[in-house]
Amino acid sequence: MPLLNGNAKKEEDFAGKKLKSLPNELLQRGGDAVKVDLQRNRLKQISGIAQLNNLTELNLSRNEFTDFPVDIRGLRQLERLYINQNNIKTIPENVFPSLEKLRFLKLSTNRLEKLPQDMNRCQYLNYLNLSNNCLKNLDPLVGLSHLKELYVERNQLAELPDLLFQNSSLTLFKANGNPLRKPPQEVCAGGLKDIQSYFAMLEANAPNVYTVKTMFLGSSMAGKSTLCRSLKQGRPVPVDEADRTVGIEISKVDSEGIRFFFWDFAGQEEYYITHHVFITAQAFVILAINLSSYNMDAQSFKENVGFWIKNLQLKIPDSVVLLVGTHVDQCTNENEVKEKKIHIEEQVKEMLETHTTNLEQQKKNFQEMEDSSSYCDQINQIERLTEYKLKVVDFVPIDCTKQGEIDKLLTRIKNEVLNKATFPSIEQTLPRIYYEVENDIQELLKNDDIAKHGIMNQRALLYELKSRHVTLDDNSLQLILQYLHRIGVIMWYKEIPELADSLFVKPSILISLFKTIVRHDLVQELNKISNAQLKSENALVIQKKKWISDYKDRASLNNVAIRILVRTELKENDITDEELIEEMVGSKKKEGSLLSLLKHFDVCLSTKHNSPLNPKANEFCPKKNWVPSNPIVYEPDACLFPSYLTDNKLVEIKWVSDNTEDLNIHVYFLPEIPYGFFHRLVIRTCSLYSPYWIGKDQCMLCCGDKRFLLRERCDEDSFIEIRCKESELETPEDIQKAWGVIREIMIRLNTLTEQWQGLCLTVHSPCKSSDCEAYFQWNDWQEWLEDTGANKFNIGQEEKLTCPNGHQRRTELLFPRTPDAST
């Protein structure tokens, strides 16, 4: 049935009709239609579409096109074209010159390898999305003078054309997920201004440099520090157990024209919650495995190898991994080393193959569903994951006590990183000024023009650098500093207000501050706090005992204890500037910069004094002013570290029990929920709603008089469950408000998943009948998160829905049919 808009122009909706050709009723109406929605069908061609000569908007997304439909060239009035999520590989010439009025074009998630040379003839095009394709060249886009937004994420681009960025109209450009070397990904991550500045400073004969971030990972006592320090110094360097890495150690190594940035990550589980801050894409991973303690069984493989491979698949699935077997000198004989090497190699091979097989099977399951076009998003997500290939290049056993084996390993590493098939973006083209600024900073440190601790006010550093580079303005220098931050030379968290003015030109000091709080022996450090230190904060010994018991029992660390520990660490690093110490440590009235940083990275959150539920309390809604019913100001006096919690007792007491009629959705993770994901989601959610109670894998929070439960399930399937108590959903308005809260939780969940490239999500509403395992699939849930004003689930106007086993439930208890725009 055609719809009429306010000007009596016809809008035809044929979405999700399983069409294989254009319907006759559409063609018969001819020129009346101005907007046609044909998404989620099975179209491979659209013969006759040119008859709709007044068409201004056409949606062909989620169909089965493999060739671009050339019939579109006859739609000369077309302004908006959606043809994303198909399988288009080529676009012929002489199509776009006919589309003179085209302003919006969405071609994302296809198989495009190149663009037609005449694409720049669409002179009025202002939005173009080419993400998730196979493009290697963007030259045909040069000359699109009205282009404002351009998306080319996740293609195969190595270089960007500089002329493209001389376009004064361009306001938004995104290119994440490409093997870029000119400009490097670290420049593009800064956005359009950084790219334009890069090309403005780039000389004709700019030097190429080989740079690689090398991360040393592995379980505790795997020999990572010994490997790292031996490779850095080019000789065997023994490391005592007492001298093992606490937190992360960073060092720079130059070897035969290659710049290595070595990041040695501590192996104790307590430190894993901070690893996500520093593990980045396009890195070279050296996974150390202690062969002397390795047992050839499933558990030993899981703990020493499988855990790390799985997390790399989720976080940076295109990384390169070199397996290094350490402590060879402590093995019985060469035969033992050989057997363990074979066992690890076979298990890794099986693990990678199983990962690919599972993805292919999941894709096949979606494709074989009756309405497979409704699952285009999930199928495309899985196809994207199958394109990632974690490269486990070799297994190298090594005796770190022998010079020859250190030399051999270093040569092996250099040969690997110089292989462009393995590291396509290792060779980077940078303006000389980038290197000069980096060298100037190191010289300022060497000459003691920067304090030894390396913490400096950004304005002071800009003043020093401008005296050496008088032609550069503040903006250009700041862009260079941001690039140096992204490659790990310095650290500058300008997005955190409390840290925007502080630069850590020696990143090691920041790591030292991290490890004062996030460490495996924190209880021992708390016990070391002296009476004099307690008196400096007006604290008592009995309070120190309470800090320790709270940390052991509730994973809560008192802010006074945090201030003492951080102050001690700063003074051990020869930092005596009281103003700087106060800024980093904080006070009873003001939070310190370090805590702001830990909260920014979802490591901890401030505790709040939970009070009994008040049914008459004013409901809190995001983006709206909230007036508390009891305007009492509570000062957070401690920080909670959810990852250290060991049970769910508090949550279970407050939640009591589930009810089959609860509002309930399941968010499934393929291949699994990443380590630490649940608690990071909890931290982000609980910073929005209060009161809350957090446990090991459960969290209950409140919004007004409604209780919500988040629960992590990692049984046969990995999913996060979100529930709202049925007893608190008395009216349709209650139900819609509950969906509004769930939407806010899922927005944070969806945003968080962007940090794990190797994840695929699906969402279900389980049937509410007891003992029924059927479910209702959410097909377009991500669109619901983006748009609060429309029904995105294609469920029509039915008051009730029926599961495959015949059980009926009200639609509004299964899907958010009409989301509340006020949320």
Image (cartoon, rainbow, N blue to C red):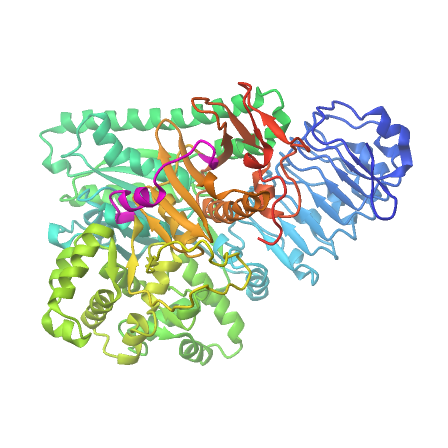
Residue 577 shown left or right of residue 463 in the figure = left
The stretch drawn in magenta includes residue 595: no
Q: Quadrant of residue 511?
A: bottom left
x and y percentages locating residue 455 in the rendered image? 32, 72
Question: Which of the two residues, 395 or 107, is positioned nearer the viewer here?
Answer: 107
Q: Residue at x 54, y 60 (%)?
A: 205
Query: Can the viewer see residue 595?
Result: yes
Question: Which of the two residues, 158 or 811, is positioned nearer the viewer here?
Answer: 811
x and y percentages locating residue 696 in the rendered image? 29, 43
x and y percentages locating residue 699 in the rendered image? 36, 46
The quadrant of the rendering that contains the N terminus is: top right
The stretch drawn in magenta includes residue 656: yes
Q: Residue at x 31, y 38 (%)?
A: 308
Query: Can the viewer see residue 245?
Result: no
Q: Name above or below for residue 12 compared with residue 746.
A: above
Q: Quadrant of residue 577?
A: bottom left
x and y percentages locating residue 583 in the rendered image? 32, 74
Residue 5 shown left or right of residue 559 in the figure = right
Q: Which residues are magenta?
A: 643-668
Residue 520 shown left or right of residue 813 in the figure = left
Q: How many marks?
A: 0
Q: Name above or below for residue 711 compared with residue 367.
A: below
Q: Residue at x 11, y 61 (%)?
A: 527
Question: Which of the two residues, 592 or 286, is positioned nearer the viewer here?
Answer: 592
Question: Which of the two residues, 20 or 136, is positioned nearer the viewer here?
Answer: 20
